[in-house]
Image (tube, helix red, strand yellow):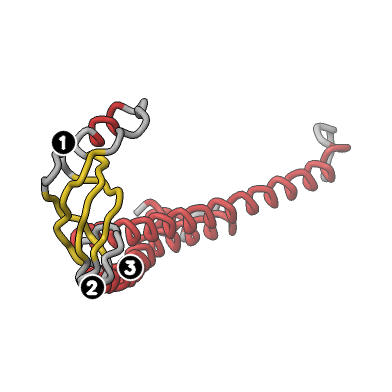
Amino acid sequence: MRAIGGLWRWRHNPLRRTTDLIEAWLALAAVLLVLGAAPLVGAVVGGAAQRALQQSVREQRQARHPVVATVVGRLDRSPLDPDPETSSARNAHSRVLADWTGPDGTARHGAVTADLRTPHRGDHFTVWTDRHGRLAARPLDSATATTHAFLAGFGAAALTVGLVEGGRRLIMWRMTLRRYARWDRAWDRAGPDWGRTGTGS
């Protein structure tokens, strides 16, 4: 709005300089780009990220399977973590030796992290594996994928705003330098005669 007001105010002003008009048009162009291009870029990037992440969700759900594991024994706790938040989160999980059977019928045995606070031999818990029974990370869920896609779109829109404003400021800086250079040349020409009686007569 300031850019539009500036354009209207300077249209017929006798004191208007060409650079004033350029600056006003530049500000207006920046506003239009921020209002138009930034949301568009954010929507395009966010949509592309959403499609890619949802495809990854579907692929992971097809490739990873939850199976029931049985505690065979408890392993020593990992070294203490100085971060209290991380430590409290780890307290709800335990490292155990467990047996499980993969989706293809392969018997497996190994060390895993169980969501058991005090595991005992014979306890059951769920682990995620591939089709051959090898341990795998929990698949990405749809809600988390959507959140990541939204953040990607928001970040792209914010980056667009930053680039537009950075470009505007860079152009303004170059225009200011040129203006100062013109002033310096004008002062150099007027300097020797400045203040003398009859100057310019």
Residue at mark 3: 49
x then y, percent, for residue 81: 35, 29
Comparing labels 3 and 2, the label whose residue is closer to the camera: 2
The picture quadrant where one finds residue 40 is bottom left
Which secondary structure, mark 2?
Answer: helix
Type of amino acid at the residue the image marks with label 1: Arg
x then y, percent, for residue 102: 22, 66
Q: Residues within 10 Å of mark 3 (few under 14, many from 20)?
A: many
Residue at mark 2: 58
Q: Is residue 157 visible?
A: yes
Comparing labels 1 and 2, the label whose residue is closer to the camera: 1
Q: Mark 1 or mark 2: name the one nearer the start of the chain.
A: 2
x then y, percent, for residue 200: 82, 45
Quick check: 149 above or below 116? below
Looking at the image, which residue is at 21% across and 39% down? 93
Looking at the image, which residue is at 74% across and 50% down? 182
The picture quadrant where one finds residue 138 is bottom left
Looking at the image, which residue is at 29% across and 70% down? 56
Q: Residues within 10 Å of mark 1 (few under 14, many from 20)?
A: few
Residue at mark 1: 117
Q: Residues within 10 Å of mark 2 (few under 14, many from 20)?
A: some
Query: In the image shown, does 181 or 111 lie closer to the viewer?
Result: 111
Which secondary structure, mark 1?
Answer: loop
Type of amino acid at the residue the image marks with label 3: Ala
Q: Is residue 4 visible?
A: no
x then y, percent, for residue 37: 38, 67
